Amino acid sequence: MKMSAMGASLSLWQKRLVTGAMGTAWVSGLALFLIKTLGQTPSEFGLQRHALETPLRAAHGGAMMLVLAAVGSVLAVHVRAGWDTGLRRRSAFFLMGVLILLVATGWGHYYVSHESFRPWIEWLHTGVGIGLAPLFWIHSRRRDPF
Ligand code: HEM
Ligand code: HEM
């Protein structure tokens, strides 16, 4: 039976932390992708990185740490309470799936060194990552729940 969603609501600070951290991870991730695919320039030593790549990596890594803290705070109450209401389950399911894939492939960036896996990890991470913003918007916007 559908229950009141009151217990599943996030506090204002939590909503800001989740939105800010995910927003920064998304923007910096997308910018990193664009700069890596379009922003490299040929030089006598081969392809040269764009000067913004390193600061963008630092921003992405910092945002990622905040995302993990924000998702941790959501896991503590919201996920269980939200699931019990029976509302927004479909978008919540996909949101959790995307977050798990991002964390797993993010981990892979650091610890998988096998040459044949790396491009797959990077493409999966970026592809799934781009979907995070629309999915988060669908899940969290005010409207009839689904
Ligand atoms: C839970 C959210 C996320 C986590 C935990 C995460 C984690 C990571 C980690 C650990 C790296 C490696 C950083 C480095 O090598 O300097 C990385 C790189 C990257 N991430 Fe994310 N990320 C997240 C979200 C996103 C999103 C939303 C996007 C895209 C919109 C994205 C796109 C990228 C790109 C393009 C790279 C560079 C990949 C490469 O080296 O080729 N990430 N991410
Ligand atoms: C299985 C996992 C999840 C379930 C079952 C779930 C369920 C729900 C439900 C029922 C609502 C509506 C609450 C209301 O009307 O006040 C909601 C809203 C929301 N959820 Fe989730 N959720 C889940 C995971 C997540 C995750 C992982 C995040 C972000 C990291 C998130 C962020 C939000 C936000 C920002 C709102 C809007 C809150 C508000 O307006 O007060 N949810 N969720």
Image (spheres, helix red, strand yellow):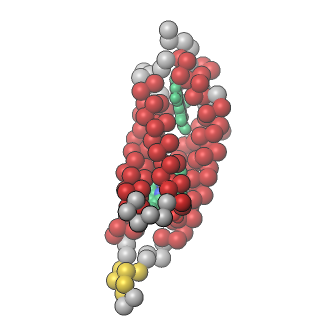
Visible in this render: residue 71? yes
The front one of 69 and 102 is 102
- Please provide percent x and percent y for residue 142: 47, 28
Give the side of residue 128 with respect to residue 107, left or right. left
Count of labels shown?
0
At x 52%, y 71%, the residue is: 54
At x 37%, y 75%, the residue is: 40
* Residue 61, quarter of picture: bottom right
- Please provide percent x and percent y for residue 121: 42, 56
Give the side of residue 73 with respect to residue 139, left or right. right
At x 59%, y 24%, the residue is: 80
Task: Residue at the far top: name it.
Answer: 1
Give the side of residue 139 with respect to residue 42, left or right. right
In the rendered view, tell whether residue 52 sits above or below residue 141: below
Task: Residue at the far bottom: name it.
Answer: 44
- Please provide percent x and percent y for residue 135: 42, 38
Visible in this render: residue 25? no
In the rendered view, tell whether residue 87 sits above or below residue 26: above
Looking at the figure, which quarter contains the C terminus? top left
At x 57%, y 28%, the residue is: 79
In the rendered view, tell whether residue 78 sits above or below residue 28: above
* Residue 48, quarter of picture: bottom left
* Residue 17, quarter of picture: top right
- Please provide percent x and percent y for residue 13: 65, 38
